[in-house]
Amino acid sequence: MEEVRIILNQISILTLLGLIGFIAGKTKYLPQNAGIVISRVVVKLTAPFLIFVTLAKREFSIESIASILGVLLLGTLFLLTSFLIGSFGCKILKLEGATANIYKMHSVFGNVIYLAFPLLSSLFGDDGLFYGVVFSIANDTLLWTLGIFLVNKHKKTSIKDNLKHLINGNTMAMCLGLIVLIVKMFLGQSINNIPYVLEVSGFVHDVLNSLGSTTFPLSMLFIGLILSEIKIEKVSDFAKRLHIFVLALFKLIIVPVLALILLSLTGDWIDPVAKHVIVLELAVPCGTIVPALAAEYGSDYRTATENVFVTTVLGILSMPLIVYLMQIMIK
């Protein structure tokens, strides 16, 4: 029950931060392109520093390799399963074209950094954030391959051009962080005998960590600004969009519950925190990066933003339920 209380408190904080962004956007207190600027600051600056610091300060052990591989492999498996479920849903709902492709993308890709990272940090501390970064490796690899293919199906873009997106600030931060992690593992305590290593590393950590930690509030301001741009003529219009609520049901409840059941049967070869991270990453609302990609590639931007709006609102209610179930099923 303690984790449920923590997530309710954290969701309340994040919701208020998002509300500040929403009000700032609706009242035009911030300029129209503020969301884009904040998003770029997060993606290109603060998130890479957060990822690097999270990996670099981690004490790596041989025993943790199984959990790391488990998060990578099982995370990828569950994401691909979500894609298959989304594809099946498209056929049942008779969705076609760009709308169907956006539906499939949002079946797979959730708000794994903007929303999940703050929650994981609050619930599980550095361990949760570490496994969250590992999960994001699997997520980002699929996003910039399968995701770009889906959002860009109507255009002729080479696979080589799409794969170039894999080289970005986040992946570079992951690689550098992993290098530091591996060096620390091989050198062990002897690294502390190198002159000034502790002093310099501590100073660098404080600088990068202070900037990286701003990822959380900036992310929620961005989400609020994005939601403020959604045009809602009538609330009743959403009732006509059955596919959004079907997506929300699968994304927020069915897929994470299925993952929860399967992970509860895997035994103790994976760290329980790693299991919690996988489930919670799968349970977050639709990713805000999908509307941005949809706009960039001329896909169905409206449906993408509506998916984000509905699942974010419903996710405030569903995520505490998922955390409660995790407490019962994963020890």
Image (tube, rainbow, N blue to C red):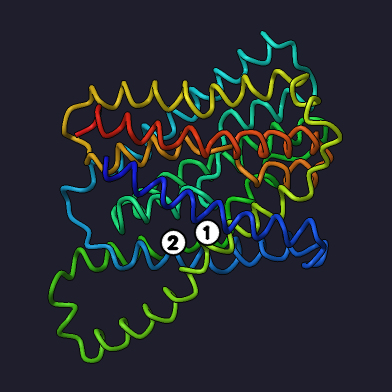
Mark count: 2
Q: Position of residue 241 (x, y in %)?
A: 75, 21
Residue at 23 percent across and 26 percent down: it is 266
Tell which residue pokes out farthest to the bottom in this image.
195
Residue at 77 percent across and 67 percent down: it is 30
- Height in image: 153 above or below 35? above
Residue 244 appears left or right of 60: right
Amino acid type shown at disc 2: Ile
Residue 229 appears left or right of 288: right
Q: Nearer the viewer, residue 48 or 95?
A: 95
Q: Earlier in the sequence, mark 2 or mark 1?
A: 2
- Height in image: 195 above or below 269? below
**Mark 2, residues whose alpha carbon is within 10 Å: few (<14), some, or many (≥20)?**
many
The reply to whether the C-beta atoms of the residues labelled 2 and 1 are less than 8 Å apart is yes
Q: Nearer the viewer, residue 298 or 144?
A: 298
Amino acid type shown at disc 1: Asn
Residue at 60 percent across and 60 percent down: it is 43
> Would you name the residue on which mark 2 appears?
51
Mark carried by residue 170: 1
Q: Position of residue 155 (x, y in %)?
A: 82, 35
Q: Disc 1 on helix, strand or loop?
A: helix
Residue 205 falls in image quadrant: bottom left
Mark carried by residue 104: none
Q: Position of residue 201 (x, y in %)?
A: 31, 81
**Mark 1, residues whose alpha carbon is within 10 Å: few (<14), some, or many (≥20)?**
many
- Give the distance between the C-alpha atoms of the residues marked 2 and 1, in whole angstroms: 7 Å
Residue at 41 percent across and 37 percent down: it is 320
Q: Position of residue 147 (x, y in %)?
A: 64, 36
